[in-house]
Image (tube, rainbow, N blue to C red):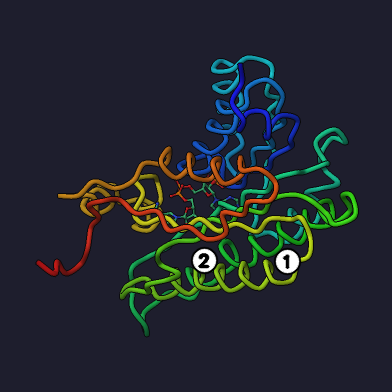
């Protein structure tokens, strides 16, 4: 007997951005594991070799009930985003769920020393990329039935709620994600499209490595004496939100580790 969540998700087409690593990769696996009989998964990122490996891994895990399509997509490139939908095979275009997960933090510099290349990279990926993908996919959802249907799940961050020193631009991108998400929910409140935001605290992924320009020892130091979330922890919440029955919107959720790194310990 399949679970209620498996039944609700069955037959859906799901797009995950940033699926080559971390939360996005785990989210693709978790969707496949939760609804293994009839699902279409479009997994996207720039590192397409990793996506192909993920498609293999999912096939080995659940068999042929989940069709996985790896698609090379740079969300910061407007041409990639504009061509995304039309570039999909027809049977993958009827998208039900978009997980806007691709994102990054770059550097720990403070103003006035923040490299403008890093500013642009974070804004282009986390803000322009997320807005662009939303606009590319929303018409598919709006065209459904009389009031539209579908889920847009945006991965924000605690950084969008509680900005901190050394990450001003990253925090600003995640605050922008929150504002955009909230306004979008208002714009679509009379539709059946669900606008969902999941805000994680610290998660152990490749995120910190990118923040420290590939310096693994600096990245590891941020995990000393604490236990961050895993990518799977966040993936479970994303799939839980998507797996609710139609009338339930898990609108805005903060997920934290019990014991997170902090710059200044209050006790
Ligand atoms: N880790 C944390 O502590 C944490 C906490 C809160 C929120 N988040 C958010 O969670 C999301 C996922 O991060 P993660 O922790 O899983 O980090 P990660 O392991 O570094 O994964 C980031 C993913 O984003 C993709 N990506 C980056 N730039 C891209 C671009 N221009 N176009 C397409 N894909 C791009 C990467 O793929 P390619 O490089 O192959 O393109 C990769 O698959 C991000 O939005 C991040 O801000 C993370």
**Left or right: 252 as drawn, with respect to 130:** left
Q: Under tag 2, what secondary structure?
A: helix
Q: Position of residue 96 (x, y in %)?
A: 75, 44
The quadrant where residue 135 appears: bottom right
In depth, the one of 155 and 106 nearer the eye is: 155
Q: Position of residue 262 (x, y in %)?
A: 22, 63
Q: Nearer the viewer, mark 2 or mark 1?
A: 1
**Left or right: 208 as drawn, with respect to 136:** left
Q: Which residue is mark 2?
A: 122
Q: Under tag 1, what secondary structure?
A: loop
Q: Position of residue 163 (x, y in %)?
A: 37, 74
From the Cβ of disc 2, is ligand 1 less than 8 Å away?
no
* Relative vertical location of residue 126 with respect to residue 151 in this rendering, above or below: below
The quadrant where residue 171 appears: bottom left
Name the quarter where the C terminus is drawn: bottom left
* Relative vertical location of residue 215 with respect to residue 169 in this rendering, above or below: above
Q: Which residue is mark 1?
A: 189
* Relative vertical location of residue 48 with respect to residue 127 in this rendering, above or below: above
């Amino acid at each position: 007997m399949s679970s209620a969540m498996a039944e609700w998700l069955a037959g859906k087409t799901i797009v995950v951005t940033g699926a080559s690593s971390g939360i996005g990769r785990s989210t693709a696996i978790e969707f496949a594991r939760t609804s293994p009989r009839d699902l279409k998964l479009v997994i996207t990122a720039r590192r397409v070799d990793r996506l192909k490996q993920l498609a293999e891994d999912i096939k080995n895990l659940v068999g042929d009930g989940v069709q996985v399509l790896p698609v090379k997509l740079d969300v910061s490139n407007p041409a990639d985003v504009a061509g995304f939908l039309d570039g999909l095979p027809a049977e993958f275009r009827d998208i039900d769920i978009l997980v806007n997960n691709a994102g990054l933090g770059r550097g720990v510099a403070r103003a006035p020393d923040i490299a403008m290349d890093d500013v642009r990279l974070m804004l282009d990926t986390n803000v322009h990329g997320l807005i662009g993908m939303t606009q590319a996919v929303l018409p598919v959802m709006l065209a459904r039935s009389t009031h539209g249907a579908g889920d847009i799940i945006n991965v924000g961050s605690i950084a969008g709620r509680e900005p901190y020193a050394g990450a001003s631009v990253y925090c600003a991108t995640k605050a922008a994600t929150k504002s955009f998400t909230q306004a979008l929910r208002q714009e679509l409140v009379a539709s059946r499209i669900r606008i969902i935001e999941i805000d994680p605290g610290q998660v152990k992924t490749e995120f910190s490595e990118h923040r420290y320009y590939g310096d693994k020892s600096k990245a590891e130091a941020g995990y000393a004496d604490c236990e961050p979330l895993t990518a799977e922890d966040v993936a479970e919440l994303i799939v839980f939100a998507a797996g609710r029955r139609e009338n339930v919107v898990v609108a805005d959720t903060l997920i934290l580790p019990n014991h997170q790194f902090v710059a200044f310990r209050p006790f």
